[in-house]
Amino acid sequence: MKNWFSLIPHPVILLFGIFIFVSISTFWLPSGKYEREEVNGRARVIAGTYHEIEKKPLSIIDVFSAIPKGFRTAVDVVFIVIASGIMFGALEQSKMVENVVGTAIRIAGLKYRYGLVFILTFLYGCLGVFVGYENNIAMVPIAAVICLALKADLMLAAGIAAGGIAVGFGLSPINPYTVGVGHQIAGLTIYSGALLRSLLCMTGLGILAIYNVNYLKKITKIPEASLALGVDSVGFELSKKLSEYRIKRMDLIILFIFVGGLGIMLWGVFNLNWYIVEISAIFIMVTVLVSLVAGGSVNSVGETVLKSVAVVAPGAFMVGFAASIKVILETSEVGDTIAFYLAGSLENLPNYIASLSMSASQCVINMVIPSGSGQALATLPVMIPVGDLIGLTRQTTILAFQIGDGVTNLFNPTLGGLVAMVSLCRIPFNQWLKFILPVTFLILVTSWLFLIFSVWIEWA
């Protein structure tokens, strides 16, 4: 009998299937919308104002025009994938990352690799908690080099980097896009209730870290069990024996440029509200400086750039393709309808079941509105009054929203950042689903236990 994982189609076919399903659903779902008001420069839904509007049927041209329009709306994310790929290509060509990682593993020794995998998962998780999501995209290929140096595979690299960042960001007690926006809408003190959220975040990262370690033990014992068999690892592998690695003066200079670039990027993110465009600019500047310092002919630099673009092009394509689903929903104006009916289905449920159903409904909504802040602004003004009506505290309502949004970020094919990070590890998305779905289930169930606890203690 075939394993059910074998039924997961190629990622392009998977996304196209979702695209077609959403497109067809717009023909039978009524168009509708909530009235919105501007609060602190953001459009926020006004609860109780949903109404149906004239149906906007999509023509076949409208449906397939959503694909190029999706690329246009996602161009910033598409480009940061390309920019980070080019930057890593320049770093790889300079041999800095290989020499630094090889030297570090030589000094630490392979005997501590299980502990290192555990620590790395938490490290990438902390990047998600404190730095953000797409902001960390440049750190993903480094996990690939480390994992291959540890005699692991690129799937483990994706589990550490993409998984760690997703869990850390999704369950972060200080996530500005979900918790921050949610607290503003609910009128609560910003980032209040941080203790319970921090315990949930650390527990989720702990589950993922143990899962990653067990995966490494499994493929160490049975190499054929690797989910990354046949994945191209050229450019990530160490080219020498560990005993031969030393950090050279040139490596230190290039490392300084790279770390300096990241430092400037973080300063801009926290002080100047930089986001994807500015981060991409920093990546390009680092690429130029590294290329100048590392030397080499002009032609070799050009070849490295195009080779790097070719490597990350599939991931960049998937990001743009995923955005087309959002275009379909916006054009047909059925996104508010989905939120309205999901919220309305909760009103007559007992508190414990209602909180779980609220979180589950956010899991569904996250597939069509992958933006955390966009989802918060669209659904929380509806969910919070429903929670008030049935007796849920506002902290619990926001936690239900955060869990539904955050945990599903581990496998959401419409989330451009996730697709990009997995692609930077060169892992096909259908293979990623085979790896991540079991641990996603464990983290989701654990998160729902925290949610039930919050209902029990009437968490305020």
Image (tube, rainbow, N blue to C red):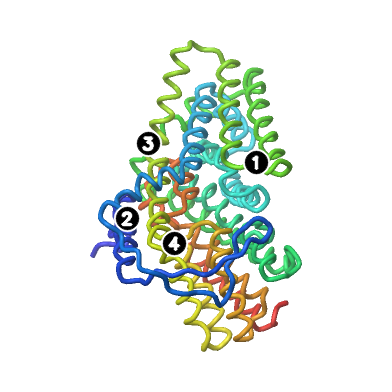
Q: CA distance from mark 3 to mark 2?
A: 22 Å
Q: Is residue 277 above or below residue 406?
A: above
Question: At label 3, which amino acid type do we have?
Answer: Asp
- Residue 102 lies in quadrant: top right
Could you tell me the amino acid type at mark 2?
A: Leu
Q: Can you identify the residue that label 4 sits on?
A: 367
Estimate the x, y position of residue 69 in percent, counting from the top left.
Answer: 39, 46
Q: CA distance from mark 1 to mark 4?
A: 26 Å
397 shown above or below 292: below
Camera-near label (2 vs 4) is 4
Residue 274's disc is 1
Q: Residue at x 51, y 26 (%)?
A: 92
* Label 2, label 1: how far apart the Cα atoms are: 33 Å
Q: Residue at x 73, y 63 (%)?
A: 191
Q: Which tag, 3 or 1, sits closer to the chain's start?
A: 3
Relative to 459, say whether 372 is above or below: above
